[in-house]
Image (cartoon, grey):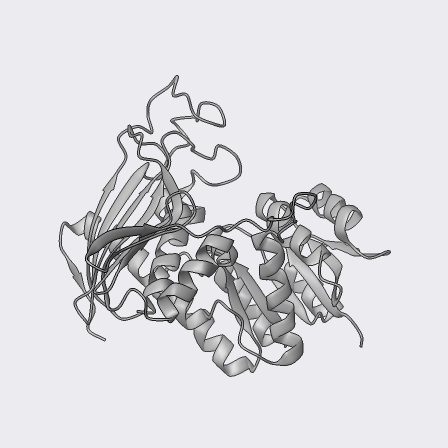
């Protein structure tokens, strides 16, 4: 069978760190062309990951119209997710778009409409679902072991890890800071575990308290306060239609030692669970309180430690398999759009000081 022809739009950090290495492990796909507004980045990507003779472009429309690929991966800043995705769908391409789905809910709706019209597949790059701890916890939830999950926390807290490269600090390009960057992963995991995508209302608080500081101890060196146009922390209180409540916490810079990222805590009627040190499931069992901690390693044999596939490799494999076998990818656009809607509501609530209530 002929391999699926993939084009990459955006050859920066996320493309090099996740998308292209993941696709390179999938035998059924080949990367035939690369596009970036900085030609040297596309040239390097073509050399490192492309097939012999892979093409390089600076205009994604020209690339898609010329190459007519089967699949397009959108790895650009948030602002351009919607126009590139919609163009690719309208040109008969399956699309994986990096998270979040879009900068705004309106853009995400336009993407969803284009997807439904296209007859193609669309997925969003929430690779944390494919971690071993997330996969195990999802199986626990699907088996009903937690019962009715009515309270949860979505964690995306860094003490001092502000990304200082690219356009991460640019509100116009990204739509925000840690909330839309890493809070989106934590919220996606939480909604997925709960299998609850019907929010009723959102109350949010957004802070920029540390962005103008220097000598910060930041993981990637001090940021430039003049370029720091986004929040450094944001928090949301989300109520679902069935009454379930989610607290979302996100930060790039926060004076706290309680640091955890892309994790969730769940409280149900039968048991609770969190993603501390792998996975812990807590419950009352035979009249005693218990904590269960599964062994998520792949070892177990003295001379063989095992080698688990990385989350981004599993993500790429299941995505290409979904296209080939005409099945649903793990991350559905109908799920990802709810994440974008809630994130936008947190920003809006913080701006107005009022709760955002959804009418539909």
Q: Is residue 96 above or below residue 116?
A: above
Q: Seen in the image, is 92 located left or right of residue 176?
A: right
Looking at the image, which residue is at 28% across and 52% down? Answer: 290
Q: Seen in the image, is 75 located left or right of residue 4?
A: left
Residue 131 shows in the view = yes
* Whole-percent x, y for residue 239 in the image: 19, 62
- Classify the position of the N terminus by image quarter: bottom right
Looking at the image, which residue is at 16% across and 67% down? Answer: 243
Q: Is residue 159 above or below residue 335?
A: above
* Whole-percent x, y for residue 54 in the image: 81, 56
Looking at the image, which residue is at 57% across and 73% down? Answer: 89
* Whole-percent x, y for residue 212 in the image: 32, 25
Looking at the image, which residue is at 64% across and 79% down? Answer: 325
Residue 106 shows in the view = no
Q: Is residue 186 above or below residue 66?
A: above
- Classify the position of the C terminus by image quarter: bottom left
Question: For this rendering, which residue is in front, 224 or 256?
Answer: 256
Q: Is residue 296 above or below residue 83?
A: above
* Whole-percent x, y for residue 204 in the image: 21, 50
């Amino acid at each position: 069978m002929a391999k699926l022809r993939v084009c990459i739009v955006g050859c920066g950090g996320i493309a090099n760190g996740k998308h292209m290495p993941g696709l390179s492990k999938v035998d059924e796909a080949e990367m035939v062309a690369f596009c970036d507004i900085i030609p040297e980045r596309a040239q390097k990507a073509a050399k490192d990951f492309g097939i012999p003779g892979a093409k390089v472009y600076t205009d994604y429309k020209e690339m898609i119209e010329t190459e007519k690929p089967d699949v397009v991966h959108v790895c650009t800043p948030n602002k351009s997710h919607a126009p590139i995705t919609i163009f690719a769908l309208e040109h008969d391409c399956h699309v994986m778009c990096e998270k979040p789905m879009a900068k705004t809910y309106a853009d995400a709706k336009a993407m969803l409409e284009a997807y439904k019209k296209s007859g193609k597949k669309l997925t969003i790059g929430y690779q944390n679902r494919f971690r071993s701890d997330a996969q195990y916890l999802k199986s626990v939830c699907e088996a009903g072991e937690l019962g009715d999950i009515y309270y949860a926390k979505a964690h995306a807290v860094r003490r001092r890890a502000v990304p200082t490269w690219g356009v991460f600090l640019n509100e116009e390009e990204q739509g925000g800071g840690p909330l839309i960057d890493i809070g989106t992963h934590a919220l996606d995991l939480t909604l997925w575990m709960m299998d609850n995508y019907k929010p009723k209302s959102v109350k949010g608080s957004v802070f920029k308290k540390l962005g103008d500081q220097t000598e910060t101890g930041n993981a990637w060196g001090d940021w430039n306060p003049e370029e720091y146009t986004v929040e450094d922390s944001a928090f949301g209180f989300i109520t679902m239609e069935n009454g379930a409540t989610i607290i979302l916490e996100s930060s790039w810079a926060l004076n706290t030692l309680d640091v955890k990222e892309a994790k969730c805590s769940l409280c149900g009627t039968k048991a609770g669970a969190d993603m501390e040190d792998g996975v812990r499931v807590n419950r009352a069992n035979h009249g005693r309180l218990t904590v269960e901690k599964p062994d998520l390693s792949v070892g177990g044999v003295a001379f063989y430690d095992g080698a688990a596939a990385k989350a981004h490799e599993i993500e790429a494999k299941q995505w290409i398999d979904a296209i080939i076998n005409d099945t649903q990818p793990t991350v559905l656009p109908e799920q990802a759009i709810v994440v974008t809607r809630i994130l936008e509501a947190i920003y809006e609530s913080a701006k107005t000081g009022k709760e955002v209530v959804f009418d539909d």
